[in-house]
Amino acid sequence: MTEHVVVEREDGLLTLRLNRLDKMNALTRAMYSRLAEVLEEAQNDASVRSVLITGGAECFTSGNDVADFLQAPPTSTDSPVFHFMRALFEFSKPVVAAVSGPAVGIGTTLLLHCDLVYVSRDAKLKMPFVNLGLCPEFGSSLILPRLLGQAKAAELLLLGEGFTGEQAAQWGIASDALDDGPTALAKGREMARRFLDLAPSAVADSKRLMRAPGRDELRRVIEEEGLLFGQRLKSPEALEALSAFMQRRKPDFSRFV
């Protein structure tokens, strides 16, 4: 249990709200465990018809809490972060995300596994894995080249270039871009509630059919990424990059060949 993930139930809508604004909703092991636990419970709870994931109207998430990461790096696929990935990947009910402010690292890649995504136009999305001496995760190395093309995906994954909520909507990463955070959150909640009036089995069957092509391949890629991610966390490059991040300096990769 952690107060940094607020769980709210309203009729058949389950809302998961990241609640660590003093740290820009940076994700810890406890937060990942709580998210995974609630999703697995919701999967088997017939009263839950849809899920909304948000960080509120100001901030989605700045990604992993680096200090927490360095203290106990997720070096195996049994780690809480990968537990959360599996729970979201296997979730059969509709998942809606409402995003504003920063959405960094897994804050962006988890959106690739949501069914509907509503972002503020000025949201700041970024996947700086290579910048931290790491590699892409949560299937992004497969999904993004297919969605955006190799060249654009390389800008986002190899260079770690950021992009706005408006661009996310233009590229198909988000369903729509709204004027601001409160509007994006309201839209996400509105669309998530629409599933409460639909036949739940028909929705689940349709989601399964939409995601079936390439699903086994994607599952294998997520596992491969996870294993390599864990190995890279122990690499000298990642240790230098993460230490530099904590020390607020530029990493020095000049000695690595």
Image (tube, grey):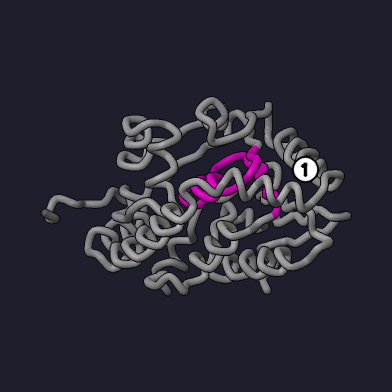
Q: Which residues are magenta?
A: 93-117
Q: Amino acid at mark 1?
A: Arg
Find residue 36 and report its horizontal and vertical position in percent. 61, 66
In depth, the one of 108 and 25 nearer the eye is 108
150 and 122: which is toward the camera: 150
Is residue 92 shown left or right of residue 26? right
Whether 114 is drawn above or below 234: the answer is above
* Image location (x, y in percent) of residue 253: 19, 52
Residue drawn at x 46%, y 56% as measured from the top left: 216
Observer able to see residue 19: yes
Question: Residue at (75%, 54%) from the top-left corner?
Answer: 15
Q: Residue 107: tell me if it is visible.
A: no
Crowding at label 1, few (<14), some or many (≥20) Cα neighbours within 10 Å? many
Which quadrant of the rendered structure holds the N terminus?
Answer: bottom right
| Residue 118, position as x, y percentages in the image | 66, 36
The quarter of the displayed image where residue 48 is located: bottom right
Q: Is residue 42 above or below residue 253?
A: below
Per the image, the residue denoted by label 1 is 189
